[in-house]
Amino acid sequence: SGLNFDIMRRWFAYRGYDVTFVRNVTDIDDKIIKKAAEQNRPWWSIGYDNERAFNDAYAALGCLPPTYEPRATGHITEMVEMMRGLIERGHAYEADGSVYFDVRSLPGYLSLSNQDLDELRQPAGEGETGKRDPRDFAMWKAARPGEPSWETPWGRGRPGWHLECSAMAHKYLGSEFDIHGGGIDLIFPHHENEIAQAKGFGDAFARYWVHNAWVTMSGEKMSKSLGNSVLVSEMVKAWRPVVLRYYLGTPHYRSTIEYSEESLREAESAYARIEGFVQRVTELAGHAVEPAGEVPPAFAEAMDDDLGVPQALAIVHTTVRQGNSALAADDKDAAVARLAEVRAMLGVLGLDPLDA
Ligand SMILES: [Zn+2]
C-alpha cells in the first residue's frame, strides 16, 4: 500500500537523504470517462473526487504529503513532446489519429517482467485500429464522440494510461531517478510500457523498482471492481487511524495482507502495548521525553535490509519490554532511556502516539 512508500521515504529522510517524492494523479482514464457518463457529470469532477478521496485516506493514515502531485491532464504538452521524440527516433507511429509504441523497436522490452516478446499475446484494445503489431500499445487515443480531447499534431485525442507516468517522471525527476514504486499488479503492462517510453525517449529512468503486494480479503485482491474493498474512509470510522497504519504499514511490503477483523484486533492490542508504555513513562517522567537522536543499531540494520519493517518493529517491542522491566524495577533512568529510543523508532514508522 501507499504506507510502505511513506515509511520508506521517512527512513530515507532519517538517513539524511533529501527525498523528492512524486505521486501521480491519473485524472483521465477509461474508468473516469465511464463513470462520468453514467452519472451525467463532467469527467473532471470525477477526477477531483477521486483525488480528494485518495488524499484524505493518505492523510488519515498519517502519510506525509508528496513533494509533487502532478495531474496527468496538466501535462499534455510534455506528453506530446515525448511522443514527438519517440516518433522521430522510430519507436512510435501515428495511425488513425492514435499514437502507438512500436514494441519491436526497443531491445530489452519486457525485461522487468522477464517475458519473451515472441510469446506475448495481446488482444487489440477497443477502437485500436491501424496497429502494425497487436502487441504495440496506445500512448495516445484518437478522440471519440462525447469524450474529452486535446489538440496534438496528430489530431485531437486523449492520453493513454502509460504515457503520463513517463512524461511526468521526466519533468519532475529528470532522465534518471532512484526508485519507482507501485503495486505488483502494475509490473505488466503498465511499468514495462513506462520503461519502454522513457528508454525510447533517451531517459535512463528508474534505477530500482519496488513493488508492493496486495491487501486481500478471502484470498482475493481488494479492489473496487470486485466489490470486496473495505475503503479506508469506511475503516477509519470503525478503527483508530494509527491502528490501521500499524496494521497495514508494518508487514513487509512484499507480503500480502489477508484482511480480517481478527488480525486488525491483534494489531490494535499490539499497538496498545506500545502506547501504554509511552504513557506510563511519560507520566513517570512528568514531561514528554524527547526522541533519541538515533534509533538503535538493530532497528537501523533491519530498515536498511530491504525495508525490513517487521524486524524493525520487533526491535520496538523488545525495547518496550525492556522499558517495562525497568519500570517494574523502579529504574526510572533506564525506562526514560528506552522511551527515548522507542519514540525515535516510532517516529520513523509514523506511529508515535505523542506525534498525533
Ligand atoms: Zn505509472
Image (cartoon, rainbow, N blue to C red):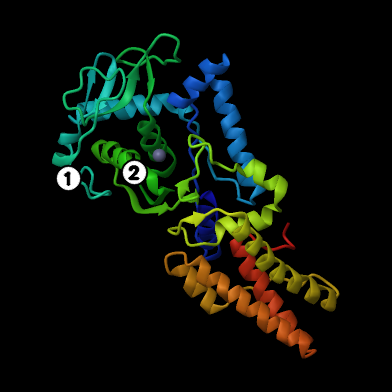
State the SS at label 2.
Answer: loop
Answer yes or no: disc 1 within 8 Å of ligand 1.
no
Is 234 situated above or below 124? Answer: below
**In-front residue for pair 37/68:** 37
Is residue 276 found left or right of 88 in the rendered image? Answer: right
Which residue is farthest front?
A: 218
Is 226 situated above or below 335? Answer: above
Residue that carries the numbered disc 1 in the rendered image: 116
Question: First in sequence: mark 2 or mark 1?
Answer: 1
Q: State the image coordinates of residue 316 (x, y, percent, origin top left).
A: 61, 73
Is 235 situated above or below 348? Answer: above
Is residue 161 found left or right of 99 in the rendered image? Answer: right
The residue under label 2 is which amino acid type? Ser
Ligand 1: give its quadrant: top left
Q: State the image coordinates of residue 18 (x, y, percent, origin top left).
A: 51, 56
Residue that carries the numbered disc 2 in the rendered image: 175
The residue under label 1 is which amino acid type? Asp
Other-residue count near label 1 (Cα within 10 Å), few / some / many at <14 / 14–19 / ≥20: few
Which residue is drawn at the image coordinates 43% and 24% (left, top)?
30
Q: State the image coordinates of residue 94 (x, y, percent, origin top left).
A: 23, 19
Asked if one can make out residue 246 in the rendered structure from this viewpoint, the answer is: no
State the SS at label 1.
Answer: loop
Asked if one can make out residue 94 in the rendered structure from this viewpoint, the answer is: yes
- Quarter holding the C terminus? bottom right
Q: State the image coordinates of residue 96 (x, y, percent, origin top left).
A: 25, 13
Which residue is farthest top?
A: 145
Which residue is drawn at the image coordinates 67% and 56% (left, top)?
242
Is residue 229 found left or right of 281 in the rendered image? Answer: left
Which residue is drawn at the image coordinates 60% and 41% (left, top)?
231
Is residue 276 found left or right of 202 in the rendered image? Answer: right
